[in-house]
Image (cartoon, rainbow, N blue to C red):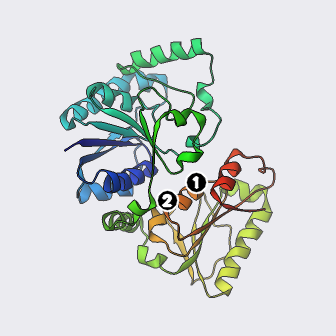
Amino acid sequence: MSNVLFMASTPLHSLWALGIAAGSFPDARCALVLIDQRDGDRDWIAETLADRMSTPFVEMRRFSEIGKTPWRKLTHARARMREVTAFTRQFAPDYVAVGNDRRAEFFAALAAAPQAMGAYLDDGTASYNQSPVPSTSQSPVIRRVVRGFRSWIYGVPTEQEPYLGTSQAVQEAWVAWPEQVHAGLRSKRLHAIRPEWFQLPQVQTVCAEACRRAGLDHGALEGVQLLLAMPHDSLVRRQPGIRVQLQALVDRTLGQGGRVAIKRHPRSQVMPLTLPDTGVIEVPQRLPLEILAPLLSGTEVVGMLTSALIYFRCLNAGVRVASLVPDGYSESPILNIYRSLGVRLLS
């Protein structure tokens, strides 16, 4: 029986770990490790798994952030790597999958388990965008110097490639749309994340419980005709026409006797729409929208330049997906991804 270690720095990675473990590693011993976690960060899928461990998951751990300042790295990095190393040696994984292969914790785990295969978990539009990570767009000489410094800071050899998923430590990648990944990922052995995995009873049970912990009764989603993923307040302020379009979508759905669910941007401070007392569900802001995908049926999902729309197309064939395109964003790279996946564009 193999041991599979999933390393998640965002709730999206935890969702992938849940589906992949249930669908592709049902006979393995799986562990979910949260890395780079700040005080107050919540990952309801991980919390659910921690409280009700069920096959194939046998362990869940949480490691706090190292920090971004040089002083924090100097004083905290090696201690955190020792914690990750100790856990990895105890769990002895044959397979280590991470959502961000630039994280030092990933390389610490692989150094502690040299027999393990490294893998990448889809990390959003960075898996499909042809532009490199900005902070790695240096000359090869500077990149070698930075790599050497990072390795000294963390106490383990690390990589920091321009494109996510392309480090030499990664041999396989789990992605929603293998045919759409950027050129750097195409050299890896690609696995498609399958929508049927997220319809498995154990996956749906965890997603429903994660919603409940976040303050949303998943049963309230039954019969929702429209799910709006709201943009940041600043975009609505800059382009008032967006509010008009979103309000019209809500009014039309309610006028036809339908029900609406709305999720504000995680950093939103206000609700810019006028909503009635009934017929509308507000999704908790900190709940990752993708968790809802396995729980919806016959819903139209409308958002704005968000990677969540990519994943709704992957995770649930029973929903329709559309994106509003703000003025001035017609050349955004994400629109090309939307077009290729059949996401409807609303000007």
Question: Which is nearer the eye, 122 or 213?
Answer: 122
Residue 42 visible within the image: no
- The amino acid type found where label 1 is placed reads Arg
| Helix, strand or loop status at disc 1 | loop
* Amino acid type of the residue that numbered disc 2 sits on in the rendered structure: Glu
- The image position of residue 332, as x and y in percent, is 73, 46
The answer to which of marks 1 and 2 sits earlier in the sequence is 1
Q: Residue at position x 19%, y 44% from top?
A: 1
**Residue 95, percent from left and from top:** 30, 38
User: Residue placed at 58% from the left, 55% from the top?
Assistant: 310
What residue is disc 1 on? 267
Q: Quadrant of residue 90?
A: top left
Spatial separation of the CA atoms under disc 1 and disc 2: 17 Å
Q: Observer-nearest residue: 162 or 257?
A: 162
Q: In the image, is 313 to the left or to the right of 292?
A: right
Q: Position of residue 211 (x, y in %)?
A: 41, 66
Q: Quadrant of residue 86?
A: top left
Q: Secondary structure at mark 2?
A: helix
